Image: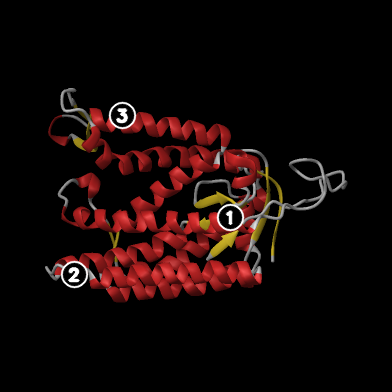
Amino acid sequence: MADVEQNVAVPDAAGNGSDAVNGTAGRFVSSPEGTALAYGSLLFMALLPIFFGALRSVGCSKSKNASDMPETITSRDAARFPIIASCTLFGLYLFFKIFSQEYINLLLSMYFFVLGILALSHTMSPFMCRVFPANLPNKQYQLLFTQGSGESKEEIVNYEFDTKDLICLGISSVVGVWYVLKKHWIANNLFGLAFALNGVELLHLNNVSTGCILLGGLFVYDVFWVFGTNVMVTVAKSFEAPIKLVFPQDLLEKGLDASNFAMLGLGDIVIPGIFIALLLRFDVSLKKNTRTYFYTSFLAYIFGLGLTIFVMHTFKHAQIRRVFTRGGAIKRGSDRI
């Protein structure tokens, strides 16, 4: 579901109703140009991981490298997924209710810091292979962990990498530190795009019926948890992690220090994306020059997401509104219309 985050005034602990940004009451009203730019940018960013992730999924399905082997989702997995997602969501809800939100988000920040670096490194790898100077030595490395000795020795970790991978890891680490320290929306989007692209590339549906089961189950999941309870809202306003793409609606007025964000969850990208990637692999398997199923589903996704954003904006429904400090970190308050 496409959500919109906006900067709103929320009363502070003293009850004086001061605005989180400039100390004045009221809410920022985005200009039509800023809103159109934000929505258009979100739509464009959503298409990037689907298109390139689908293309990379074709090569991934033929890869013999263990690190690039895809995870195949069966119909049984698809049927279980909404149940597992519901348990995870409700578990997070209980955690945020019982334990301190600050410490939970600290742990989550460290967890996504590591995952984000690995995901961004994997995303950058093909590009680095093309721009890496041929005259520079590309040394090979191997990370090997074993258990036992002699004939009973067993491999726990056996990972091979090279100089190009180390460069990607270094660049990704810089982005990771930037995200942890500043929670800047650009760093958030770099991690978010990397997560989405890797998801579309490495998560493979085994057939169309499995995709229908998955999409149908998650439709019911969304309706129940978003409109039937306050669980999704509570978790969403408490969860600080790069699991969404954001773009400021006040970018034209405030530049990179903008704080009034429109948001699109990664689930709205990855779940349809793995279905579209399946259709591209089916097109390739037909060994024809056309990509009819892929382009048809891709255009349908553009239309569907665009229509969803239009409806969300027109009827002001299913919106999460939060107060942001500079750099995009949530400061306090949230409500859903």
Tell us which disc is closer to us: 1 or 3.
1
Q: Is residue 53 left or right of residue 13?
A: left
Residue at left offset 45%, top offset 71%: 304
> Mark 2 packing: few (<14 Cα in 10 Å), some, or many (20+)?
few
Is 18 in front, or is 72?
18
Q: Earlier in the sequence, mark 3 or mark 2?
A: 3
Disc number placed over residue 167 in the picture, else none:
3
Q: Which mark is residue 320?
A: none
- Asked if 335 appears above or below 105 in the picture, the reply is below
| Residue 136 drawn at (x, y percent) | 19, 23
Residue 203 seen in render: yes
Residue 146: tell me if it is visible: no
How many tags in the picture? 3
Query: Decide: marks 1, 2 in contact (CB < 8 A)?
Result: no
Q: Are marks 1 and 3 in contact (CB under 8 Å)?
A: no
The C terminus: image quadrant: bottom right
Answer few, some or many: residues within 10 Å of disc 1's Cα (few below 14, many 20 plus, some between 14 and 19): many
Residue designated by label 2 = 290
Q: How is the image coloured?
A: secondary structure
Q: CA distance from mark 1 to mark 2?
A: 36 Å
Amino acid type for the residue under numbered disc 2? Thr
The residue positioned 77% from the left and 51% from the top of the image is 9
Q: Nearer the viewer, residue 198 or 287?
A: 287
**Residue on which disc 1 sits:** 262
Query: Which of marks 3 and 1 precedes in the sequence?
Result: 3
Q: Quadrant of residue 4?
A: bottom right
- Give the residue type at disc 1: Ala
Secondary structure state at the residue bearing disc 2:
loop
Residue type (three-letter) at the residue carrying disc 3: Ile
